[in-house]
Image (cartoon, coloured by chain):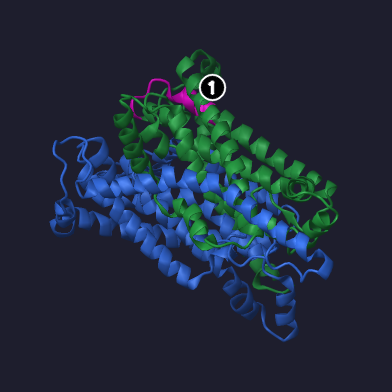
Amino acid sequence: MIDVATSRRAGRVLAGLFTFEIIFLWSPIVLLYIFSFNQGTVLAFPFSGFTLDWYKAIFDSPLLLKSLHTSATIAAAASTASVIVGLLMSVPLARRKFRGKAPITALVLSPLVVPHLVFSIALLLLFRFVGDALGIVSIFAWPTVILGHVVVLLPIIVLILVPRLQRVDAALEEAAQDLGASGFLTFRSIILPLILPALFSAYLIAFIISFNEFIIAVFISGSATTFPIYVFGQLQYPTELPVVVATTVIVVTLSLVVVLGAEFLRRRLERRIDLLSETTGILGVSDSAT
Amino acid sequence: MGVESTTHVADEAAPPSPGRAKGQASLLKGRRRLTQRLLALPVIWLIIFFVVPVALVALYSVGLLNSFERNPGYTWQAWGDFFTGGIYMRLFWRSLRVAIIVSVVVVVLAYPIAYFLSMVAAKYKYALLILMITPFLTNFFLRIMAWKVILADQGLVNNFLFLTGLRAEGNPLDIAFGPIPVMIVLTYVWIPFVMLPIFASLISVDRDLLEAANDLGASRWRAFWQVTFPLSLPGIGAAFFFVFIPTIGEFVVPLFMGGPKGYMFGSAINDLFGISLNWRTGSVLSLWLVMVVFAFAYVFMKFVKLDRLADV
């Protein structure tokens, strides 16, 4: 294979650029790691000494723990629901031809094109409208956030699953049906195992997006406080900023471990189901060329 | 869009053998019913929680719905004020400029990285990709906080400038507030995210095409410009869009780093709904944003087939 990238000089330049951008991307995060061990209560230089107190303090802050719990609950529910609904939708979109396919595709992808701010406001108006109609004063709570998150997660899941489903050989499906398998059995025993890695990465991505989502949550969560909302409050009226930094350091470290672990697992899984000819990265990126 | 050009299984199945024809017909009918059932839930969901809410914004913008005044009535006044008033329009042009600059810079910075990962970093490309993307998983506000530490008057950058004598102490580079720090932070935020579609389009470039270009005597640069680059255009387009849409509606970063000069269209929408409770004008601005983004999306779709970028 011959391309600019494969010349030695270009490879070196690109590697240099890559290193530079890795530093650019990681330097604020390295700062957060450092500040999580700093005795001072504000994020500023100079440092005032090493401490592990902030990590201990996480467990003494019920509001912080509760916000983490709320975010995890919302993320788990929203990602599960959106992966199921997204799968229901992706199968016909990828493998069937039917009337109304174009408008339905446009509908499912259109949340990608609407800024979250506008969508949040639209949801706010909807729930207020429904609340007024039903006479409920405060309809907003963490379940409303789940409803909103599913809408913005759906197009992302469909974009991950559809290309995978399209690559499942149609002959396999036909063979199963010729042998008398029902539609559901075909799906369960042929299609599902083949797209399991893609489903898994779709779930992981959905979970992470939902967990970190702020704009929709802040508009329609009512009095429920998600982790991003909690951090937002801490920035405006800091009372325990270093504790929040320590928490974030743990979250980042954990997500790095989980994502790398998932990538490792995926490789093993794909090897097992004999998909070596074409693999898909944990982030759903297809890799048919290698 | 995404999924139209598909390998159609059901309705274009191979011509049925005579004995199978009857069974095939009932099978197709069953499949059609199944397709409808599978799609019903998602479509209803999206109509209730996406189409209806956006329609409500439209009703608010023309006064047919109202939360704070009595006697809702049909009026185009808020729209008229928006187009003739000047303030919000000026804010809009400012935000549009910021969004375009940020999108272009992000794509220019992300492309070589995606290119490097897909072409050069063979075995470790996914591990490196994850390393690249993890910052994206960190809480947004804390990353902004970290950037404030870096860009503040007594921050890392200025301290470095003082130390090296590039800048006199007491005369720091003014990068703590304003449009420039907003653009720096937004660029920072979007690079990892935007790498993915570019990486996806580059990794699926057929390597045989590059071999062929080489066999036909093309230089490395020529192979890049005539094979690799055109094939990665859909990824570039998608990347541009993934940055442009959230950036033009951005209000969080301007809130922390914008100052008065960095106030943006999204900030105005947020304030109209949150502080001044002028929901009608806020709805006009929101709807205008949606219309502009859809217009961009439409033009974009004319050039790029979305089903290519669906390969992400």
Residue A78 image-quadrant placement: top right
Q: What is the secondary structure assignment of the residue under circle 1?
A: loop
**x, y (%) of residue B60?**
24, 45
Visible in this render: residue B231? yes
Q: Tag 1: residue type?
A: Phe
Visible in this render: residue A36? no
A10, above or below B189, in the image: below
Residue at x 52% of width, y 18% of height: A58
What secondary structure predominates along the stretch shown in magenta? helix
Looking at the image, which residue sits at the far bottom? B216
- Magenta highlight range: A236-248
Give me the chain letter of mark 1.
Answer: A
Q: Is residue B267 left or right of residue B99?
A: left
Residue at x 37% of width, y 40% of height: A123
A241 inside magenta stretch: yes
Looking at the image, which residue sits at the far top? A60
The N terminus of chain A, quarter of image: bottom right
Residue at x 60% of width, y 36% of height: A80
B199 inside magenta stretch: no
Chain painted in blue in the figure: B
- What residue would you read off at disc 1? A50
Q: Is residue A3 left or right of residue A131?
A: right
Residue at x 41% of width, y 51% of height: B246
**x, y (%) of residue B190?**
48, 51
**x, y (%) of residue A243?**
48, 22
B258, above or below A222, in the image: below
The C terminus of chain A, quarter of image: bottom right
Q: In the figure, what tint was chain A given?
A: green
- Local crowd at mark 1 within 10 Å, few (<14), some, or many (≥20)? few
**x, y (%) of residue A164?**
68, 55
